[in-house]
C-alpha cells in the first residue's frame, strides 16, 4: 500500500490546497460575516492536513508487499472496455437514439465477461432495449431520445 | 396530535392501496438486492430514485425504505446457503448459518433468520413510534450552533466506526463536504468553484454521484475479479418452521439482538454490520457452551440477524427527527426526501405528518410482507442466485445509465455519474471508502448553513460553539473520538520516544 498511499495522499492534499486557494479568492468574509469561501477554506486546509496522516506513515513505512495483485491479468482490459462502452452510450445517445444505442451497448456488454453465442447476446440486447424503452418511455413517461429512429 | 391519532394516521396512509403496492415492490426488490451479492442497498436506492420523482413523497420513501430494510432479510439467504454474504450486515451470519446448512439445517437457519428479522423489525418500528416524537421535541430546541455540533459529531462517528483507516475516512468526509460547496452559495447567491461549467452551476445532484460511486464503480471492481463459481447448497428447504427447541434457544438472542441492534442503529455509523457483530460477540460470551459457536449454533444466526434488522429501523430515527443520516443508505433516502421538498429534521413531524407517520406505518406492513416473501418464496430467491454475474452486470449498468439520464433528461448527468464511477473505482483500489464522502456531501449544505448562521448570531465570536452546552458536549465527544487513536497509542506504549 506504500506507493498507493503516497500517490493518493499527495493528490488529496493538492485538492485540499486548491480548494483553499479558490475559497480564499471567493472571499473569506463578507461585511464582517463568514463569506462564501470561509468554510470551504477551512475544509480544504483540513483535508490537506489530514492527508499528512496518510502521507507520513507511508513515507516511514518500509516497502513491503509488492505482489499485491488483486487484479488478475485481463481485468483492467475489461474495465477499460466497459468504460468505453459506457462513454460511447452517453456520447451517441442524443444523435443515434435510445433504442439503437442501448441495443449495441447490451450486445457488447453481455459478451464482455464470457464468450456467448451471438444469437443469445442479440436476443437479450433486443429484449432489454425494447422492454426498458417501453417501461421508461411509455409507462414512466421519461423522454428518451429517439435519434435516428425519430420517424417512428 | 395524541398517540392514538398518530397511530391511526400511520396505518391510514400505509394501507392506501398505492402505498401497499409500492411497499410490496420495495420489499420485493430489497429481498432481490439482498440476495444478490455485489449490488447493495445504496446503489439500488439511487438507481430507483429517478423513477420515484413523480410519486407523492410518502409513497416514494415507503418504497425506498422497504427496499432498504428488505435487503437485511435477503442478505442472510446467501450467507446461509452459499457462505457469501449478500450484504455487509450479514457477514457474521456466514459463521453459523452456513455450518447449519452443511449440517442439513438450512431450513431452520433461514426460518429463524426470517422470524428473528420480523420480530426485530417490528420491535424497531414500535420504538420509532415511541421515541421519535420526544426526540423531535428535543431537537426542535436546537439552534444553528447545536446543529453544527451534531453534524460534526455525526460525521466523526461515521469515520470513527468505518471499517478502513480512520484518516482516510475522515478525508473522504471532507471531500464530500468540499463537493457540496460547489455551485451557488445559498447566502450570497454567488457561483463558486464551478470552473465555469454550467452543468454544475446549481451544484451537483446526489443521484449521479451515488450511482457512480456505488453502482458503476462496484461493477468495474467486479469486472476485475474472475467470476466465482457459485455452488448453491443442495439441501431440502422444507422444515423452514423452526422447532420448539430452536425457538427456545433463539428467544434470548432475538430479544437481546433486537434491543442491542436498535440502539446501535441510532448511532451514526452504527447499525448494520456493527450491530450484527456485537450481537454475535455478546451471544458467544454469555452462552453456556460457547464452543458450539462457529459449528452451526442457531443462536449465532438468530442474534445477529435480529440485530441488523432492528438496527436498520433504528437508523431512521436520527434521520427523521434530526436530519442526520446514520449511514449512506439513509443519506440517499434523505436526499430523496429533499428532492420531494420534504426536509428531514425536527420540523418534519409537524410539517409533514403524512410522510412521517406513513413511512413509519408502512414498516409494520413491510416487515410482515418480508416475512411472507422470504419464507414461502425462498426457493425462488435461490434460483435467482443462479443468474451469472456476466449477465447481471450489463443490466446494472443500463439501469445506472437510464437513472442518471432521467435526473435532468440530459446526458451531462450521465457523464458526471461516469466520472464518479471511475473515481469510486480508483478510491477503492487505493483503500478509500466512498460512504463517508456521500455522507459529507449530503450533510454539507446543512453544516455550512448552520455554521454561518451561528457566527452571524454571535457576531463572529467562535466561543458560541463552546459556550452553548449542547453544542459543546457534541464537539467535545467528537474531538475525543478523533484523538482517541493517538490517546490509545500513548497508553499502550507509554511515552513514545521522539526520533524513534
Image (cartoon, coloured by chain):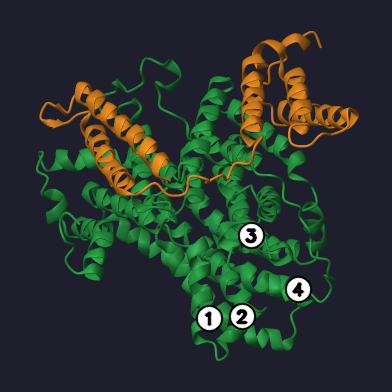
Chain colours: A orange, B green
Q: Which residue is mark 4?
A: B102
Q: In what element is the residue under mark 4?
A: helix
Q: Which chain contains the residue that carries disc 4? A: B
Looking at this view, is A88 or B262 the one in front? A88
Q: CA distance from mark 4 to mark 2?
A: 16 Å
Looking at this view, is B298 or B323 the one in front? B298
Question: Around disc 3, counting alpha carbons within 10 Å, would you say few (fewer than 14), some (14 to 19), or many (20 or more)?
Answer: many
Task: Say which quarter of the image contains residue B459.
Answer: top left
Q: Which residue is mark 1?
A: B283
Q: CA distance from mark 2 to mark 3?
A: 18 Å
Same chain check for tags 1 and 3 = yes
Q: Are marks 1 and 2 in contact (CB under 8 Å)?
A: yes
3 vs 4, front mark? 4
* Mark 1 or 3, nearer chain start: 3
Q: Which residue is mark 3?
A: B85
Q: Which residue is mark 2?
A: B299
Q: In what element is the residue under mark 1?
A: helix
The structure residue drawn at horizontal position 75% and vertical position 9%, both measured from the top left corner, is: A148
* Mark 2 or 3, nearer chain start: 3
Amino acid at each position: 500500500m506504500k506507493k498507493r498511499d503516497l500517490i493518493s495522499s499527495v493528490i488529496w492534499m493538492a485538492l485540499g490546497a486548491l480548494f483553499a486557494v479558490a475559497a480564499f479568492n471567493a472571499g473569506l468574509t463578507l461585511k464582517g460575516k463568514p463569506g462564501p469561501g470561509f468554510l470551504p477554506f477551512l475544509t480544504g486546509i483540513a483535508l490537506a492536513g489530514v492527508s499528512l496522516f496518510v502521507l507520513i506513515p507511508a513515507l516511514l513505512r518500509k516497502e513491503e508487499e509488492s505482489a499485491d495483485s488483486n487484479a488478475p491479468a485481463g481485468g483492467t482490459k475489461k474495465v477499460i472496455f466497459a468504460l468505453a462502452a459506457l462513454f460511447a452510450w452517453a456520447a451517441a445517445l442524443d444523435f443515434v437514439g435510445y433504442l439503437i444505442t442501448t441495443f449495441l451497448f447490451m450486445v457488447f456488454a453481455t459478451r464482455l465477461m464470457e464468450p456467448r453465442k451471438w444469437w443469445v447476446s442479440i436476443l437479450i440486447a433486443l429484449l432489454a432495449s425494447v422492454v426498458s424503452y417501453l417501461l421508461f418511455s411509455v409507462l414512466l413517461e421519461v423522454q428518451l431520445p429517439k435519434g435516428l429512429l425519430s420517424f417512428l | 396530535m395524541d398517540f392514538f391519532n398518530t397511530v391511526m394516521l400511520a396505518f391510514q396512509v400505509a394501507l392506501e392501496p398505492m402505498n401497499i403496492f409500492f411497499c410490496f415492490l420495495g420489499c420485493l426488490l430489497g429481498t432481490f438486492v439482498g440476495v444478490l451479492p455485489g449490488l447493495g442497498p445504496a446503489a439500488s436506492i439511487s438507481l430507483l430514485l429517478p423513477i420515484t420523482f413523480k410519486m407523492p413523497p410518502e409513497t416514494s420513501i415507503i418504497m425506498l425504505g422497504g427496499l432498504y430494510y428488505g435487503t437485511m432479510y435477503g442478505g442472510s439467504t446467501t450467507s446461509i446457503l452459499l457462505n457469501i454474504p449478500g450484504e455487509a450486515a450479514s457477514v457474521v451470519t456466514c459463521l453459523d448459518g452456513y455450518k447449519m446448512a452443511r449440517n442439513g439445517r438450512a431450513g431452520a437457519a433461514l426460518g429463524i433468520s426470517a422470524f428473528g428479522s420480523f420480530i426485530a423489525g417490528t420491535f424497531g418500528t414500535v420504538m420509532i413510534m415511541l421515541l421519535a416524537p420526544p426526540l423531535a421535541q428535543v431537537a426542535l430546541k436546537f439552534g444553528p450552533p447545536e446543529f453544527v455540533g451534531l453534524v460534526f459529531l455525526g460525521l466523526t462517528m461515521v469515520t470513527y466506526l468505518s471499517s478502513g483507516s480512520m484518516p482516510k475516512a475522515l478525508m473522504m468526509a471532507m471531500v464530500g463536504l468540499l463537493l457540496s460547496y460547489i455551485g451557488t452559495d445559498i447566502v450570497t447567491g454567488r457561483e463558486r468553484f464551478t470552473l465555469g461549467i454550467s452543468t454544475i452551476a446549481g451544484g451537483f445532484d446526489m443521484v449521479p454521484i451515488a450511482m457512480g460511486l456505488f453502482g458503476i464503480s462496484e461493477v468495474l471492481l467486479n469486472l476485475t475479479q474472475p467470476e466465482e463459481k457459485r455452488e448453491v447448497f443442495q439441501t431440502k428447504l422444507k422444515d423452514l418452521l423452526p422447532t420448539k427447541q430452536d425457538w427456545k434457544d433463539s428467544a434470548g438472542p432475538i430479544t437481546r439482538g433486537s434491543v442491542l441492534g436498535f440502539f446501535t442503529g441510532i448511532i451514526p455509523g452504527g447499525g448494520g454490520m456493527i450491530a450484527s457483530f456485537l450481537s454475535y460477540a455478546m451471544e458467544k460470551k454469555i452462552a453456556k457452551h460457547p464452543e458450539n459457536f462457529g459449528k452451526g449454533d442457531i443462536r449465532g444466526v438468530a442474534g445477529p440477524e435480529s440485530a441488523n434488522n432492528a438496527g436498520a429501523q433504528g437508523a431512521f430515527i436520527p434521520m427523521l427527527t434530526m436530519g442526520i443520516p446514520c449511514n449512506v443508505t439513509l443519506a440517499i433516502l434523505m436526499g430523496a426526501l429533499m428532492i420531494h421538498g420534504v426536509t428531514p429534521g425536527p420540523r418534519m413531524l409537524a410539517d409533514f405528518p403524512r410522510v412521517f407517520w406513513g413511512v413509519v406505518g408502512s414498516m409494520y406492513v413491510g416487515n410482515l410482507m418480508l416475512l411472507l416473501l422470504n419464507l414461502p418464496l425462498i426457493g425462488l430467491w435461490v434460483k435467482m442466485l443462479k443468474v451469472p454475474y456476466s449477465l447481471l452486470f450489463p443490466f446494472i449498468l443500463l439501469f445506472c445509465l437510464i437513472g442518471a439520464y432521467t435526473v435532468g433528461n440530459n446526458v451531462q448527468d450521465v457523464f458526471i455519474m461516469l466520472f464518479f464511477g471511475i473515481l469510486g473505482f480508483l478510491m477503492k483500489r487505493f483503500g478509500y471508502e466512498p460512504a463517508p464522502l456521500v455522507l459529507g456531501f449530503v450533510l454539507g449544505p446543512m453544516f455550512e448553513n448552520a455554521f454561518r448562521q451561528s457566527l452571524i448570531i454571535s457576531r463572529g465570536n467562535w466561543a458560541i460553539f463552546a459556550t452553548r452546552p449542547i453544542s459543546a458536549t457534541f464537539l467535545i465527544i467528537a474531538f475525543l473520538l478523533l484523538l482517541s487513536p493517538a490517546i490509545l497509542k500513548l497508553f499502550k506504549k507509554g511515552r513514545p520516544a521522539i526520533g524513534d
